[in-house]
């Protein structure tokens, strides 16, 4: 099959995934869910359905124990189906990324171009309050801070947008410093501006931490330009933060950090502290080894909040745990929590993710982020895991850089 045919086959699905997955659909429903039968057919055609079996067994194993402990059947069945569709998506994404590896640069480039066009449109409509909500997230970042619109494009939330686009942004960011782009400044603007406009502290924070750690690990095996950028970028960031302290002490960054340290930032506290506290108490009171089961958090949450935590204020109609690992702990108990971490580390070692700067940064970023946000059926997170374990862009191999230097 020619590259053009492969490109035409997959690009529409990628556009849906990156930009329109939940657009105009009821909350909780995604086109990747609706397209599950097509994915199953694709796996059947590629003779890869067997790859689903072991993962399915891992999901089925806790079910008898969860049912014995007691579940609300309707929510339990629906949520298990939703998680199964996420599994199908993950396996399909893994196979697709491997199959279309040779044209991933072309596909990523199209996504970056489209994203840039949408960002320009978003900037144009930003001053118009009646239209802004289409492409911007109009919810205050933290308590007491004036509303600052955050870029989300057609996704449901700014942090989700930045997370799902992060592999594309990182890919082209690294290509600039590996001298692979003809117009580096244009690429840097196309990558950095949308990420900054999303104001997603969680995603950006995890990415920056991962970037610094991985660059230090591979310091002698990366281009000199990337070394210089890291040094000067770190120095500039420190000077900027110190300067802001004196010039603009009430800036949004310091304001939110202050709220976080005071425990007054509801988003950070909910993701980092209350999620694990709530998950721990849920499994202790129900089933510590296999959890309470899919779809049960919203069933038992109100009762626990009122009777266990003695809280009698306003409680949302649907209570969620906004943290992937905390949600995993509550739904699948210690079994799910340990299994997920084991599989991540196992494939990290087996596939030698540590030999590739791009894959390593992605791995460390999403490994950190899963403890600070996301949810277990989040296709943005699953897509990143599929990229990490499905493809290794050879240009970013540490070994390749080392051999190149030796040749010189």
Image: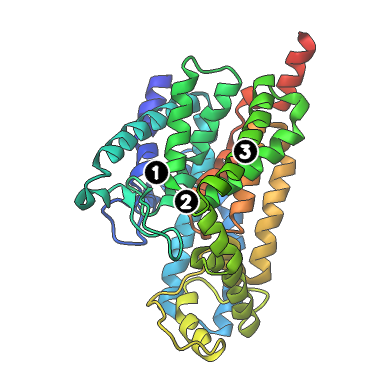
Q: CA distance from mark 1 to mark 3?
A: 39 Å
Tag 1 residue: 17
Residue 290 lies in quadrant: bottom right
Q: CA distance from mark 2 to mark 1?
A: 9 Å
Compared to residue 238, the image places residue 267 above or below, namely: below
Residue 208 lies in quadrant: top right
Q: Position of residue 373 (x, y in %)?
A: 54, 58
Q: Quadrant of the N terminus?
A: top left
Compared to residue 388, the image places residue 130 above or below, namely: below
Q: Earlier in the sequence, mark 3 or mark 2?
A: 3
Please report the residue visible at 54 percent of the width from the left and 31 percent of the height from the top. Answer: 171
Closer to us: 294 or 61? 294
> In the structure shown, which secondary structural element does the residue marked by tag 1 occupy?
helix
Compared to residue 293, the image places residue 96 above or below, namely: above
Residue 378 appears left or right of 122: right
Tag 3 residue: 239
Label 3 crowd (10 A; few <14 / some 14-19 / many >=20): few
- The answer to whether the residue labelled 2 contacts the one labelled 1, judged by CB atoms less than 8 Å apart, is yes
Identify the colour scheme used: rainbow
Q: Earlier in the sequence, mark 1 or mark 3?
A: 1
Report the mark closest to the observer, 1 or 3: 3
């Amino acid at each position: 099959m020619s590259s053009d045919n492969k490109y035409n086959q997959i690009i529409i699905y990628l556009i849906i995934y990156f930009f329109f997955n939940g657009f105009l659909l009821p909350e909780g429903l995604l086109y990747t869910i609706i397209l599950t039968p097509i994915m199953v057919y694709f796996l059947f055609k590629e003779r890869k359905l067997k790859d689903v079996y072991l993962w399915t067994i891992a999901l089925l194993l806790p079910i008898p124990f969860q049912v014995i402990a007691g579940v609300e059947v309707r929510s339990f069945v629906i949520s298990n189906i939703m998680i199964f569709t996420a599994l199908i998506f993950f396996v399909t994404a893994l196979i697709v990324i491997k199959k279309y590896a040779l044209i991933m640069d072309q596909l990523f480039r199209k996504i970056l171009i489209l994203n840039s066009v949408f960002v320009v449109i978003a900037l144009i409509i930003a001053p118009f309050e009646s239209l802004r909500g289409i492409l911007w997230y109009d919810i205050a970042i933290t308590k007491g801070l004036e509303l600052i619109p955050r870029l989300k494009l057609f996704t449901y939330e700014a942090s989700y947008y930045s997370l799902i686009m992060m592999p594309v942004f990182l890919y082209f960011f690294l290509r600039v410093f590996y001298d692979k782009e003809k117009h580096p400044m244009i690429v840097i603007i196309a990558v950095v501006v949308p990420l900054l406009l999303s104001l997603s502290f969680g995603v950006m924070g995890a990415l920056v931490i991962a970037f610094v750690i991985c660059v230090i690990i591979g310091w002698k095996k990366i281009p000199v330009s990337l070394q210089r950028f890291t040094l000067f970028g770190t120095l500039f960031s420190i000077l900027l933060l110190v300067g802001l302290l004196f010039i603009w002490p009430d800036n949004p960054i310091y304001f939110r950090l202050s709220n976080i340290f005071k425990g007054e930032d509801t988003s950070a506290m909910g993701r980092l502290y209350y999620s694990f506290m709530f998950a721990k108490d849920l499994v202790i009171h129900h089933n510590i080894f296999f959890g309470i089961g899919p779809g049960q958090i919203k069933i038992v949450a109100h009762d626990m909040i009122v009777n266990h935590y003695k809280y009698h204020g306003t409680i949302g109609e649907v209570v969620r745990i906004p943290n992937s690992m905390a949600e995993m702990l509550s739904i699948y108990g210690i079994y799910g929590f340990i299994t997920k971490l084991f599989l991540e580390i196992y494939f990290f070692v087996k596939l030698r993710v540590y030999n590739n700067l791009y894959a390593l940064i992605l791995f460390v970023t999403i490994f950190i982020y899963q403890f600070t946000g996301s949810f277990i059926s989040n296709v943005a997170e699953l897509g990143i895991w599929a990229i990490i374990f499905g493809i290794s862009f050879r240009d970013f191999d540490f070994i390749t850089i080392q051999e190149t230097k030796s040749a010189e």
